[in-house]
Amino acid sequence: MSDAPYRYPFQVRLHDTDAAGVLFFGHLFRHVHDAYESLMADLGFPLHELIRNGAAPGATALPVTHAEASYRSPLHQGDRIEVLVTVADVRRRSFALDYRFNDREGHTRATARTVHVLTGADSDLVLPEDLRRALTGHEDATDGSPTPSD
């Protein structure tokens, strides 16, 4: 894969919004997870297979252990958004993903980050090499990590 971010488009639906008519804050994480699932499937690691078979020998899961988001401007019903996913960090048994929610004009409306850790009974678990290689193809070479002030 290339160093370009992974792109995941979606449209804000009525059921995504709250009484104020904007994206309910918690629903941003549903779209984060949808983009993550799509990325993993495109990398050849569909989540349903990782859940059924384990992410690595001896591993039981690859859960999100940390999630954060910054909201820059409201997302309204009907807005077309593109989520740009980049790999922020790959470590021995974990990786971090950054998400930028851009509108059609390219303005960043929200950012998020998730950290995923390989878990299981064996404390010596490491990310499988093929998963590590697939993820590093989407690393952000500019270290454009989203921060609350970014």
Image: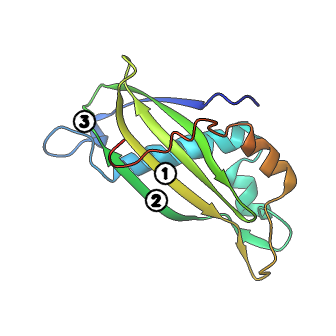
Q: Give the side of residue 140 with respect to residue 69, left or right.
A: right
Q: Mark 1 and mark 2 in contact? Answer it, CB < 8 Å.
A: yes
* Residue type highlighted by circle 1: Arg
Determine the residue positioned at 60% across, 65% down.
Answer: 63
The residue indicated by pointer 1 is 113
Give the x, y percent position of residue 145: 50, 44
What is the three-letter code of the residue carrying label 2? Ala
- Mark 1 and mark 2 lie on one chain; the one further toward the N terminus is 2
Q: Quadrant of residue 139?
A: top right
Q: Residue furthest top?
A: 105
Residue type, numbered disc 3: Ser
Which quarter of the rendering shows the N terminus? top right
Residue at 57% from the left image edge and 48% from the top image edge: 97
Residue lying at the far front of the rendered structure: 142
Q: What kind of element bears circle 2?
A: strand
Q: Nearer the viewer, residue 150 or 135?
A: 150
The residue nearer to you, when weighing 53 against 61, is 61
Dot 3 corresponds to which residue?
Answer: 73
Residue at 61%, 60% (x, y): give it. Answer: 116
- Give the residue at the far left of this rendering: 20
For residue 104, side relative to residue 114 (left or right)? left
Q: CA distance from mark 3 to mark 1?
A: 17 Å
Q: Quadrant of residue 17?
A: top left
* Residue 88: percent from left, percent from top: 60, 47
Residue 47 sits above or below residue 108 on the image: below
Q: Which one is earlier in the sequence, the residue at label 3 or at label 2?
A: 2
Left or right: 110 in relation to 36: left
Q: Which mark is residue 3?
A: none
The image quadrant where one finds the C terminus is top left
| Dot 3: element | loop
